Image (spheres, rainbow, N blue to C red):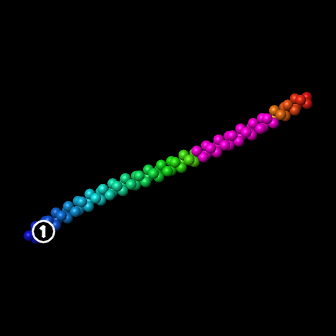
Amino acid sequence: MIEEQSTEVTVETTKVQEKVSTQFQTLQVHDSTFQMDLITKKLDSQRGLGEQERERQLDKREKMIRQTEEQLSIQQKEVETQRVWKTGMA
């Protein structure tokens, strides 16, 4: 009878250990999936920041180009005005 009870306890213990082992493996898989999701979100966020920074730099360069074009236009008009004055005086 004691051997029978011991065998039953051993079988039950083995079943519980297998169940716990399976649950642990499942948790590991879920944790790995969760970690990958976090990494993916972080990478996406960093990519977004990089794209925003590039966009900001492009906007800044375009603004500088427009300002330079305006300055050149003003200088061109001044040069034309000076030519007209010189031509009229000669």
Where is mark 1, residue-wise? 5
Above-or-below relation of 48 to 15: above
Q: Would you say the magenta stretch is mainly helix, strand or loop?
A: helix
Q: Residue drawn at (69%, 40%), measured in percent from left and top?
A: 66
Residue 28: image location, x then y, percent: 33, 57
Inspect the image, locate mark 1, and give the three-letter code of the amino acid beneath it: Gln
For image coordinates 26% across by 61% down, the residue present is 20
Q: Residue furthest bottom?
A: 2
Direction from residue 39 to residue 62 in the image, left or right: right
In the image, taking residue 23 as reference, residue 48 lies left or right, namely: right
Residue 37 is one of the magenta-drawn residues:
no
Left or right: 46 in relation to 3: right
With 34 as the anchor, is 62 left or right in this view?
Answer: right
State the image quarter where residue 74 is shown: top right
Q: Secondary structure at mark 1?
A: helix
Answer whether residue 71 is magenta in the image.
yes
Q: Quadrant of the C terminus?
A: top right
Mark 1 Cα within 10 Å, few/some/many (few <14, many 20+)? few
Q: Which residues are magenta?
A: 55-78
The residue lying furthest to the right in this view is: 89
Tell me which residue sits at (37%, 53%) in the image.
33
Identify the residue shown where x is 12% and y is 68%.
5
In percent of width and height, residue 79 lies at: 81, 34
From this view, report whether residue 50 is shown above or below residue 1.
above
